Each structure stands twice: as structure tokens, then as C-alpha cells.
Image (cartoon, rainbow, N blue to C red):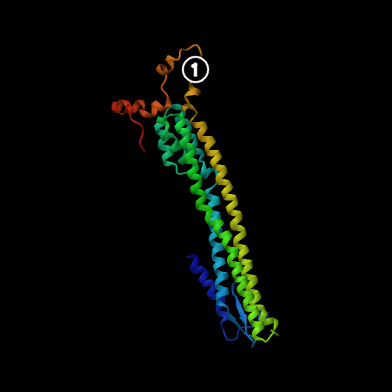
Amino acid sequence: MMVGVLGSILALLVEPATANDVPPESSRSFADAFFVSTRAMPDGQRSIEWLGTGIIWLLISASAVSLGGTLYFLWSTQSEALIPSQSRDHVSRFLASGGYRKAIKISEEDRSFFGTVLHSTLLSAPKGHAAMVMAMEDAADEETARRLRTVDFLNLVGQLAPMAGLFGTVYGMILAFQSIVAAGGNADPVLLAGGIGTALVTTFWGLVVAIPALMGYAVIRNRILNASEVVIGEVTELIRPFDPDLRKSTVPAAKPASNIEVSGQSPQAALRGSPDELQANPQSHAQAPRD
């Protein structure tokens, strides 16, 4: 759809310039100056410079794509999108009440940054708290790298757009010097205007594409990196009950150590079989969750 719209606009802009009675260079409109590259003829008429026009519209298309991508990534990297408060609250409540299986199910259904990291972390609970921390860090690194690769095309567009504009600049200057050679060294300034105009307009559009793309990439990249740190902090706080050292430190000193395992069940053991599941299937007590 976008290509069709841009093509229609280009056709409307180009059609007047291809007529035999095109006005001279001095009466060019704003649209002709910034969207169409033309070459002045010795008789005062203008003709379309197709390569220069193609470069201009290539940069305009890249600008539209990068702007749309920037807006989408800004929306998808909001705090609520990366760390949904509703999902976080549900998981926190279930973990506090011992509903570890329900917490795993919620994290599996949550496709956000927070849900992806938490799900990988909870699946490693039967292996111990240290394994959960390692799984959390690995999942956070992988999710950060995946999201950065997704937005890296903005950086690519921002780097290539000035190069395309520079190509148009060099091409426009070549046209200008060719007009000087054709006129025997005494070219009319009107004949030079076409090539110089192509050089300046392509440079203009190259900067129009590059500046917003690079700014958007920097903002989105910082959002993703900050979200990674926040998610690690949130998940670390949620899995604190799985830390055996923390559980031992909260037990009163008067109680013997042997009573700890008798009086309470660790989260790791609960994940191997909840009370409801044990009543329905006693054989599942020793099995770890498989999602």
C-alpha cells in the first residue's frame, strides 16, 4: 500500500514535468524542487532526471519505513509492554501463596520481556536457586540480544541513508560539470541549476532519513537495556523464597535444623508436585514440570 501511494504521488509530480510546455527553471514549484530531479535544456525547457529522482524517492521510502518502525518500537518498548504490572502482580501473589504451578502457567502465557525471563527461571526451580539465577541471566541476555537485533535495522537505515544521499550529491555534481563541458566552459547558470539541485536535494533527504532513524535507535536501545536491568531485579525479588540460605536465616535459632525439612516444604519440592496434583496422581511427586 505504501509503495502504491508513493508511486501515485510520484506520477502526479512527474507528469507536469514531462510535458512539452513545462515552464522554465525559475517557475518550479516546491514539489518539483524537493520530490523530482530535473535537468534544464538549452531551449529553457526541463526534462526528468530519472536516476536522481529514483534516489530521492528511495530515500523518501526509507524515511517512511524508518519512521513507522520507530513509532512501533517506541510503543512496544513502553514499561507496561515490557513488564506488565498485571502479570507481575499475579505471579507475585501465586508465589507468595505457594501456587508455583499457576505462576509457571502465567509466565508461559506472558510473551513480554518479563514473562519470557521469568518462565525460563521458574522452569529451573527443581535444580536449585543457583540454577534459577543462571537461567534468569541467560534468558535476560538472550531476550535483550533478540530485541536489539530487531531494532538494528534503524541503525542500518541511519548509516546507509547518508551514503545514498552522498551518491546523489556526486551524481548531481557530475551533471553540473557535464553542462559546463557541453556549453564550452560558459554554461548558463540555469543549466547548472539542475545538477546542483539534484546534489542538494539528495543530501537533504539523506539527512532527513538518517537523523530520526539514529535518534530513534538510540532511544529504543536504551529502553531495552534499562528494561533488562529492571526485569532482572524484579525476577530476583520474586525468586527470593527459593534461596535456601534465606529460608534458613528466617528460621528461629531455637528450632533444631532437623525440624526445617519436617515442618515446611521448599518451593523446589513444591514444584515437583503440588498437594492437589499429589492427590490426583501420587506418582507425579518426583517429577519436575515440563512445559
Question: Is residue 11 in view?
Answer: yes
> Residue 70 in the image: x percent, y percent?
55, 55
The answer to whether 48 is drawn above or below residue 5 in the figure is below
User: In screen coordinates, is 274 left or right of 71?
Assistant: left
Quarter containing the C terminus: top left
> Residue 126 in the image: x percent, y percent?
40, 30
Q: Amino acid at mark 1?
A: Val
The answer to whether 75 is drawn above or below residue 270 in the figure is below
The answer to whether 143 is drawn above or below residue 211 in the figure is above
Question: Is residue 34 in view?
Answer: no
> Residue 247 in the image: x percent, y percent?
48, 22
> Residue 206 in the image: x percent, y percent?
61, 65
- As drawn, the residue found furthest toward the bottom would be 43
User: In screen coordinates, is 95 left or right of 217?
Assistant: left
Residue ID for mark 1: 251
x 43%, y 14%: residue: 259
Of residue 64 and residue 1, the one placed in the foreground of this image is 64
Of residue 206 and residue 30, the one placed in the foreground of this image is 206
x 35%, y 31%: residue: 288
Q: Secondary structure at mark 1?
A: loop
